[in-house]
Amino acid sequence: MKGWSVTEENVAAVMEKIKAAKVTAPSTSTIVFMALDNSVYFGSDRIGSRYSPARDTTEKYHVKGKLVMAEKANLVEMVKQLVPVMNKVATMQKIFVTPLPRYRRIL
């Protein structure tokens, strides 16, 4: 799901898709979670205000200002919102892919 970020609504939509698909993977399966990439990075200006990355006309996202990561408390809340999905696949091994910034500075 391109451009997906962790929100209660998005998690509920994923749960509906899982239910509709009647996912029946064996308990030996591995689930890879890449759910935080679009939720943890922000741009920050000189006074500390944060801005979400913005999409340009070519559908690429850009961070304006300094690249900063969400606070620990925000990350904890994002992971808490994913608990229903994790519970749905409780017997399976889970791997969380850590979000990494993909950017280059243009001077």
Image (tube, rainbow, N blue to C red):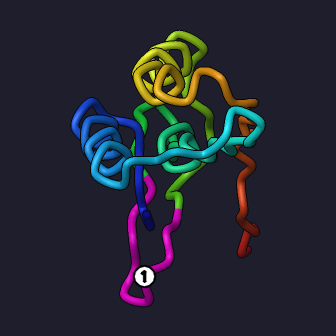
Instruction: Point out the image quarter for the N terminus.
Output: bottom left
Instruction: Point out the image quarter for the C terminus.
Output: bottom right
Q: Position of residue 13 (x, y in %)?
A: 26, 45
| Left or right of 58, for residue 26 | right
Residue 92 part of the magenta segment? no
Q: Residue furthest left?
A: 9
Q: Residue at x 45, y 30 (%)?
A: 85
Q: Quadrant of residue 98?
A: top right
* Helix, strand or loop: magenta stretch: loop
Q: Position of residue 30 (x, y in %)?
A: 74, 41
Q: Residue furthest bottom?
A: 58
Check the image and report above or below for 92 versus 53. above
Question: Residue flagged by tag 1: what amino acid is it?
Answer: Glu
**Toward the viewer: 91 or 51?**
91
| Left or right of 75, for residue 52 | left
Q: Position of residue 82 (x, y in %)?
A: 46, 26
Q: Residue at x 31, y 43 (%)?
A: 19
Q: What secondary structure is marked by label 1? A: loop
Q: Position of residue 4 (x, y in %)?
A: 41, 54
| Left or right of 36, for residue 50 | left
Check the image and report above or below for 19 versus 75. below
Other-residue count near label 1 (Cα within 10 Å), few / some / many at <14 / 14–19 / ≥20: few
Which residue matches tag 1? 59
Number of marks: 1
**Toward the viewer: 87 or 50?**
87
Q: Residue at x 61, y 33 (%)?
A: 69
Q: Residue at x 59, y 21 (%)?
A: 90
Specify the segment rendered in magenta.
53-62
